[in-house]
Image (cartoon, grey):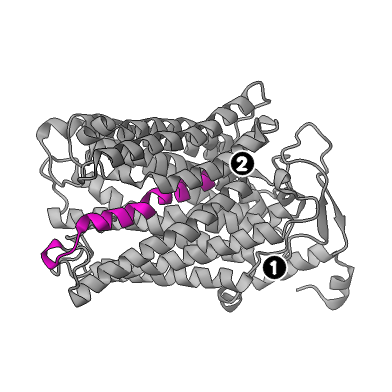
Amino acid sequence: MASAGEAALQSPAETYRVHYLNAKYGIKSWLLTTDHKRIAWLYFFSTTFFFIVGGVAAAMMRLNLIEPQGFLVEPDTYNKLFTIHGTVMIFFFLAPAVPTVLGNFLIPMMIGARDVAFPKLNLLSWYIFMTAGTCFLYTIIAGGVNTGWTFYTPLSTSYVNTHVFSAAMAVFISGFSSILTGLNFIVTIHKMRAPGMTWSRLPLFIWALYATSFIFVLAMPVIAITMVLVMLERVFHVGIFDPALGGDPVLFQHLFWFFGHPEVYILILPSMGVMSELITAFSRRRIFGYGFVAASSFGIAIISFLVWGHHMFVSGESVYAGIFFSAMSMLVAIPSAIKVFNWTATLYKGSVSFEAPMLYAIGFIGLFTIGGLTGVFLATIGLDVFLHDTYFVVAHFHFIMVGGAIMGYMGGLHFWWPKMTGKMYPDYWARLAAFITFVGFNLTFGPQFILGFEGMPRRYAIYPARFQLLNIMSSAGASILAVGYLMPMIYLAWSIKYGPDAGPNPWKAKGLEWETESPPPVHNFESTPVVTEEAYAYGTEPARAVAVSS
């Protein structure tokens, strides 16, 4: 610790930094912190742990599918594995990763604020998240649940499946964490922007998280109450969903997918925001069509609430409802296509450099485009009837959720890691990891489109021998993909101790977050910044803001 005399000679920013770096070693100071940056780190370690849990379940499934009759686990255990994989990845990694890790760390800095609007509520949301995660870990230890992550009734309400209650409780609790995070972000973005940070100057990452926050607030209560109804039916035997008790299982599907399809955009919208930051920074150009890209985030968020029925084309809904949901599903592709078009136009004739974050961004564009186009296939009623519940669906949503959401998260993590830690990672290994991830992903999920088109159903532990070659290719790809995910864990951890100092702005990027020290001081800015130019003003003078006394 610096002496009182030394501290008096330090700048306010250096004083904050010394306080931050020394305070971080106390466990109590972490568990009671209200610093948005440290809460982001808590989420980072938590979501990484759950990513590993979900990844292990996926690895066991892929190993089992090397043999047509399976060799690793029994069919009932296989059912539990895909339930663990889906539930953990959706609710405890994919949905929270970008908003709670990158969003928590960056939103206040990107808008010129010292913290989020409700710091204590921010910490509470992490405790709620960990309570939900612990509840689901108990479910796994107690024997698991075999309903799939969708908890379809009447399977989930049958009393033979004894661990549905704790699994549903975990999902119920996790929803409150997301709701609190969404409310916090909405108020922060509305009320705490620095002078000059008008709506038309907001970074597109902020626009994406702003739209995502509304989905959090509107969609999460639906899944929460749906899980409550499942638990009530199991405990009190009331006839809500179980047809044997006079209930309607299709009602559950309506409730679940009213949440479930907006949930897809909870996963992908934040990564879309990351893409806008990466593409402008590494092409050294203003974003093409800023207003359209910003508005498309809200277009996606709004239309996402009107497409849930395309999951139910074979569930007995009317032809007219099917036509409506098919049309809405085609419509939601338009704002997504706007983003891809504008990113591509931004790259055109740009001064593109291929650092690791940019490689992840380029991979995102390719994989997300394939995922989006195959989604149009599944939104077409005639094709969906044929492809429903086959591996074509598995490939499609993994191209969105893994090829899109995780590639975006990894790109953002590599982009802002120097800001978060003050250290640079080895660029060669980072580029290699991005390449291995891209190759491994395509080898894993590309063959599954063919498997689905040839009729292999999803969620089966055994399959006809004629599908074995494609399953072996998919399992081999999963092994390569695992290497691509493990490598960043190693070199990013290495960089914290051994990496060279990054400096405030190693990428020479635009944005208020790059005008603070790395890692940032406790209160982000020595004094309140004033924004004087548009977002992404590449080709202008480096200074984006002037500081005024707080």
Q: Nearer the viewer, residue 244 or 538?
A: 244
Element type at mark 2: helix
Location of residue 488 in the rendering, given as x and y in whole percent from the top left corner: 49, 47
Element type at mark 1: helix
User: What amino acid is found at the position of numbered circle 2 in the picture?
Assistant: Ala
**As displayed, is residue 89 above or below residue 280?**
below
Residue 253 colored in magenta in the image? yes
Location of residue 191 in the rendering, given as x and y in whole percent from the top left corner: 70, 61
**As displayed, is residue 451 above or below residue 161?**
above
Magenta stretch: give its range. 243-272
Side of 458 relative to 350 (left or right)? left
Distance CA(mark 1)–CA(mark 2): 34 Å
Location of residue 509 (image quadrant): top right
Location of residue 393 (image quadrant): top left
- The residue that disc 1 covers is 20
Side of 204 relative to 341 (left or right)? right
Residue 222 colored in magenta in the image? no
**As displayed, is residue 96 above or below residue 386?**
below
Location of residue 313 in the rendering, given as x and y in whole percent from the top left corner: 25, 41
Location of residue 446 in the rendering, given as x and y in whole percent from the top left corner: 32, 31
Between discs 1 and 2, the one toward the N terminus: 1
Q: Nearer the viewer, residue 99 or 63?
A: 99
Q: Which quadrant of the figure contains the C terminus?
A: bottom right
Identify the residue at horizontal 80%, vertical 50% (top origin).
196
Side of 204 relative to 244 (left or right)? right
Identify the residue at horizontal 32%, vertical 70% (top origin).
228
- The residue that disc 2 covers is 294
- Counting other residues with Cα less than 10 Å from the Cα at mark 2, is it few (<14), some (14-19), or many (20 or more)? many
